[in-house]
């Protein structure tokens, strides 16, 4: 099992915001913390959903739950709660963790050039 990405005090703060906890209507989530850890692992690694380690459960189940929570605004509520006491005394950005799609290399688009040529020709 990978190391935890969410501290216990952070988990306590967001636990009440999560869907599928005891007391909610419908099915109870089997392990909300493991699910949140899976989503954090995905965000940290940038891996495709299919590469999610089996320790987090089936990738498709995790993805569908992630998608449902996104549609219901659960992630926005979690981020808002965790950012209440953000400490920006030190912020580090490292471009090696920013990933771009392989087709985002900046090659010129032929269609854009044709549209631009038409616009210039009209003047």
Image (cartoon, helix red, strand yellow):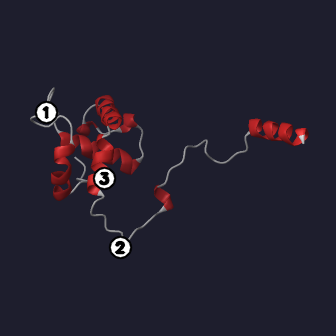
**Residue 65 higher or lower than 12, as above or below:** above
Which residue corresponds to mark 3? Answer: 80
Give the residue at x 29% y 29%: 61
Q: Which mark is residue 24?
A: 1
As drawn, which residue projects farthest toward the top? 26
Label 1 and label 3: CA atoms lie apart by 21 Å
Instruction: Specify whether residue 39 is in view.
Output: no
Please provide percent x and percent y for residue 7.
20, 57
Among numbered discs 3 and 2, the one appearing first in the sequence: 3
Give the SS element for disc 3.
helix
Single out the mark in the foreground, 2 or 1: 1
Among numbered discs 2 and 1, the one appearing first in the sequence: 1
84 vs 42, nearest the viewer: 84
Asked if marks 1 and 3 touch (Cβ < 8 Å), the reply is: no
| Crowd rating for badge 2 (residues with CA inside 10 Å; few <14, some 14–19, many 20+) | few
Give the residue at x 47% y 63%: 94
Give the SS element for disc 1.
loop
Among numbered discs 1 and 3, the one appearing first in the sequence: 1
Which residue corresponds to mark 2? Answer: 89
Q: Quadrant of residue 108?
A: top right
Is residue 106 toward the left or the right of residue 65 in the image? right
| Crowd rating for badge 1 (residues with CA inside 10 Å; few <14, some 14–19, many 20+) | few
**Residue 52 higher or lower than 27, as above or below:** below
Please provide percent x and percent y for residue 81.
26, 53
Label 3 and label 2: CA atoms lie apart by 19 Å
Is residue 92 toward the left or the right of residue 72 in the image? right
Give the residue at x 37% y 72%: 90
Give the SS element for disc 2.
loop
Q: Which mark is residue 97?
A: none
Q: Quadrant of residue 34?
A: top left
């Amino acid at each position: 099992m990978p190391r935890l990405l969410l501290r216990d005090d952070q988990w306590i703060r967001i636990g009440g915001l999560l869907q599928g906890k005891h007391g909610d209507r419908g099915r109870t989530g089997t392990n909300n913390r493991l699910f949140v850890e899976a989503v954090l692992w995905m965000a940290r690694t940038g891996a495709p959903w299919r590469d999610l380690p089996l320790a987090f459960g089936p990738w498709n189940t995790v993805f569908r739950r992630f998608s449902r929570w996104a549609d219901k605004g659960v992630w926005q509520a979690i981020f808002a709660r965790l950012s209440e006491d953000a400490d920006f005394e030190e912020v580090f950005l490292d471009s090696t963790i920013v990933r771009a799609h392989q087709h985002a290399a900046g090659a010129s688009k032929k269609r854009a050039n044709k549209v631009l040529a038409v616009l210039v020709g009209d003047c």
